[in-house]
């Protein structure tokens, strides 16, 4: 049996990068008392992309960035930039899994929340190999 890469490890690795390289907290589930600015992670798609030699999956992750309530968009732009810069450092995943590629797919949207906070979504993809194919 071939062990798949656990999504919990992906979320943990992304959280670690953001919290290490920015001043923001990063959640997988946002607590009711969370104070902005903060981020939270949502895994939205996992696609099988095996090739001739490796078993691989492409994981699409949305990083939601929440800024303080203000009339200006400058704070959300700065937070998005901080997340993008934090994620230029590759995530660290456990053996025997291999991070093949980490891709920034950019800013998807910025919305105004009912609370007055700004909400941006930045998309990243992680191509992770979890086994090699052999011929007998």
Image: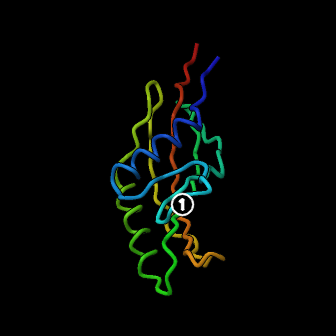
Note whether 118 is above or below 131 in the view shown.
Answer: below
Counting every numbered tag in the picture gives: 1
> Which residue is at a point 50% across and 58% down the rendered structure image?
39
Who is closer to the viewer here, 122 or 40? 40
Quarter holding the C terminus is top right
Q: Is residue 92 left or right of residue 55?
A: left
Name the residue tied to disc 1. 123
> Which residue is at a point 49% across and 65% down the rendered structure image?
36
Who is closer to the viewer here, 120 or 60? 120
> Which residue is at a point 48% across and 52% down the rendered structure image?
26
SS state under label 1: strand
Quarter holding the N terminus is top right
Tell me residue 55's x, y (percent).
Answer: 57, 31
Furthest residue to the front? 33
Tell me residue 103's x, y (percent).
Answer: 46, 55
Note whether 105 is above or below 78 in the view shown.
Answer: above
Note whether 117 is above or below 19 in the view shown.
Answer: below
Who is closer to the viewer here, 97 or 70? 70
Who is closer to the viewer here, 93 or 70? 70
> Which residue is at a point 39% across and 50% down the rendered structure image?
19
Q: In the picture, residue 62 is in which quadrant? A: bottom right
> How does the figure colour the protein chain or chains?
rainbow
Classify mark 1: residues with Cα within 10 Å, few (<14), some (14-19) or many (20+): many
Note whether 9 is above or below 104 in the view shown.
Answer: above
Q: Is residue 84 left or right of residue 7?
A: left
Furthest residue to the bottom? 71
Tell me residue 115's x, y (percent).
Answer: 62, 75
Tell me residue 48's x, y (percent).
Answer: 65, 40
């Amino acid at each position: 049996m071939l062990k798949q890469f656990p999504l919990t490890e992906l979320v943990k690795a992304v959280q670690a990068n953001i919290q290490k390289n920015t001043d923001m907290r990063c959640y997988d589930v946002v607590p009711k008392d969370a104070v902005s600015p903060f981020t939270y992670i949502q895994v939205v798609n996992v696609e099988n992309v095996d090739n001739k030699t490796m078993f691989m999956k492409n994981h699409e992750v949305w990083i939601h960035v929440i800024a303080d309530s203000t009339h200006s968009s400058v704070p959300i732009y700065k937070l998005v930039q901080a997340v993008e810069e934090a994620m230029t450092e590759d995530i660290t995943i456990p053996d025997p899994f291999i991070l093949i590629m980490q891709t920034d797919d950019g800013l998807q949207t910025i919305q105004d929340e009912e609370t007055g906070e700004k909400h941006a979504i930045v998309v990243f993809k992680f191509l992770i190999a979890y086994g090699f194919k052999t011929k007998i």
